[in-house]
Amino acid sequence: MLQMKLCGDLVLREKCAPVTEITPDILKTLDEMTQMMREQNGVGLAAPQVGVLARFLVMMDPDSNTVYKMINPRIVEFSDEKCTMEEGCLSVLGADNLPVFSHVSRPAAVTVEWTDENGKDCAARMSGLPGRIVQHETDHLDGVLFIDHLSPVRREMVMRKVRRHKR
């Protein structure tokens, strides 16, 4: 059974290796990650969050409930327009054992390319929540957390809540 890695675990700061072959283990992990994401009321989960240093993730479009299983996702285009939205993370928990949230500014839309679980090459332009989620989750694959996009003051406010969780 997969276990969620929490803020402070060094695996969350590692850059993930590309997937060279879609193996039964990867497919099983994608399925388990999807189940875990749903059980925790999340909308995305990247492999390093469960201790796997490989470039794959799962995410859900909250509007359509479509689940994407993305292998080697790459954001190939970012819009010039920015958008600020509240973000949280299943790996960044507060004292109540729930994600800590903060407003993050990111491009309003992105174009992402990936390979799906069947080995098919896919591409999509994503904006709104799906665009936000794919940026957040692909950041995880490069060892970046949403708190890295915050001002030092906002980041310290979030980290204070995280430290209370660890006590």
Image (cartoon, grey):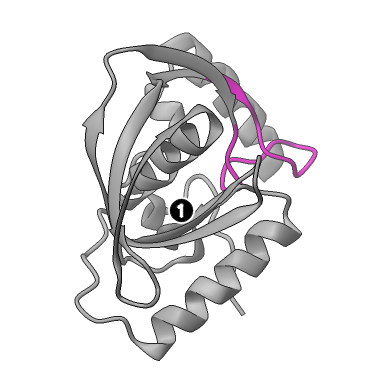
Residue in the foreground of this view, choosing between 118 and 27: 118
Q: What predominant SS class does the magenta segment belong to?
A: loop
Type of amino acid at the residue the image marks with label 1: Asp
Residue 142 appears in the rendering: no
- Quarter of the image with the C terminus is top right
- Quarter of the image with the N terminus is bottom right
Residue 58 shown left or right of residue 62 in the figure: left
Residue in the foreground of this view, choosing between 157 and 57: 57
Extreme residue toward the bottom, this view: 24
* Crowd class of label 1 (few under 14; some 14 to 19; many from 20; radius 10 Å): few
- Choose top left, top right, bottom left or bottom right for residue 103: top right
- Horizontal and vertical percent position of residue 11: 38, 58
Count of numbered circles in the view = 1
- Horizontal and vertical percent position of residue 50: 50, 65
Extreme residue toward the right, this view: 96
- Magenta stretch: includes residue 75: no
Residue 147 shown left or right of residue 124 in the figure: right
Residue in the foreground of this view, choosing between 142 and 61: 61
- Horizontal and vertical percent position of residue 136: 43, 38
- Mark 1 lies on residue: 9
Q: Which residues are magenta?
A: 88-103
As displayed, is residue 92 above or below residue 69? above
As displayed, is residue 146 above or below residue 114? above
Q: Is disc 1 placed on a helix, strand or loop?
A: loop
Residue 16 appears in the rendering: yes
State the residue at coordinates (62%, 34%).
163
State the residue at coordinates (40%, 74%).
117
As displayed, is residue 3 above or below residue 133? below
- Choose top left, top right, bottom left or bottom right for residue 55: bottom left
- Magenta stretch: includes residue 89: yes
State the residue at coordinates (29%, 21%).
79
